[in-house]
Image (spheres, rainbow, N blue to C red):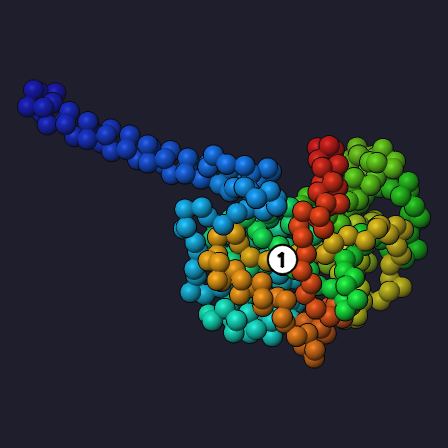
Amino acid sequence: MNPPALARTVPRLASRLLGVTAALLLALFAGSAFAQECARGALDARYCDVDGDMLADPPADGRYSDPSTLVFTYAPTEDPAVYQDAFGEFIDHLSELTGRPVVYFPVRSYAAQIEAMRAGRLHVAGFAAGSVEEGVNAAGFIPVAVMAADDGTYGYEMEIIVRAGSDIRSLDDLRGRQLAFVSPTSNSGYKAPAALLYAELGMKPDVDYQTAFSGGHDNSILGVVNGDYEAAAIASSVLDRMIARDVLAEEDLEIVYTSQTFPATAYGYVYDLTPELAAAVREAFLTFDWTGTALKAEFADSDRFQAIDYATDWDVLRKIAAASAELE
């Protein structure tokens, strides 16, 4: 290269290098902005928990989210389309109290739901019981309510089901057999049964029994009915609703195990909503009148949304998650 050409090239290269360096420094700075120096417990580095309630604190820098349209979704325990109409009247109520449109966003997996909230695309949601902890820790989810009966009772049981006439009659009969789960983040659909089988019988997944993941409680249930799976771990509430809708008959299946009662789906919002908007969302859940609604028709055992305390009400599920993690 001749000297004049070299003289022209060096400044251009230097400028490009400086640009790349500046971009890298900017990216590093932006990333470090999330990693705040604060108490956070098990929360992701982008969140703080100064008050010790195990939930992400509102943004300390005042950078709140104030979306013109709220996005809402329900836990993907079954086909998302099933619930879009069921939540229609609640969505109208939420829109009225927040003063802005609300759209229903169907998600196909727990992971997709968590990622959508973490990325700021999802503002209000119902997280399945087993994914609440990850939603709280990784996505800044603030759970405020569960569906409950008028007497204050709420929750569901984990059941292990088999096809009618199966020779699997007990948990021990699962040795060497196939057991379908929903997903690794599901409480009743993985964490609880895996921890139970290990604690009571010393059985490990893919060592003492074969595992399969169906992607949904409804898929697991129908898979057992159709003979695709030998057994499945599912949420009793989903099975009850499918039987009530005549998707299958009660006599198509047999239940070989029923657990203690666990907390159910938790409803709430993302941590960085403006205080006024967060308060309106909370109020919407706690004031919604279920009488004569599609939500009451779909969730017949529930009569209202009831306030919860994540630190205490989800303690049993956090312990199950910790126990199931020991199997990995």
Determine whether the residue tagged by mark 1 lies in a helix, strand or loop.
Answer: strand
Query: Which residue shows up at 58% across the image and 68% down it?
Result: 284
Residue 94, horizontal then vertical, whole percent: 55, 69
The residue where tag 1 is placed is 144
Q: Quadrant of the C terminus?
A: top right
Residue 11's quadrant in the figure?
Answer: top left
Residue 92's quadrant in the figure?
Answer: bottom right
Q: In terms of depth relative to the viewer, which is nearer, 286 or 9?
A: 286
Q: Amino acid at mark 1?
A: Val
Q: Is residue 104 above or below residue 180?
A: below
Residue 159, horizontal then vertical, whole percent: 83, 52
The reply, left or right, for residue 136 in relation to residue 299 is left
The reply, left or right, for residue 16 in relation to residue 220 is left
Residue at the extreme bottom: 292
Query: Which residue shows up at 12% across the image and 20% down it?
Result: 1
Query: Which residue shows up at 87% across the image and 59% down it?
Result: 253
The reply, left or right, for residue 303 in relation to residue 42 is right
Q: In terms of depth relative to the viewer, which is nearer, 178 or 182?
A: 182
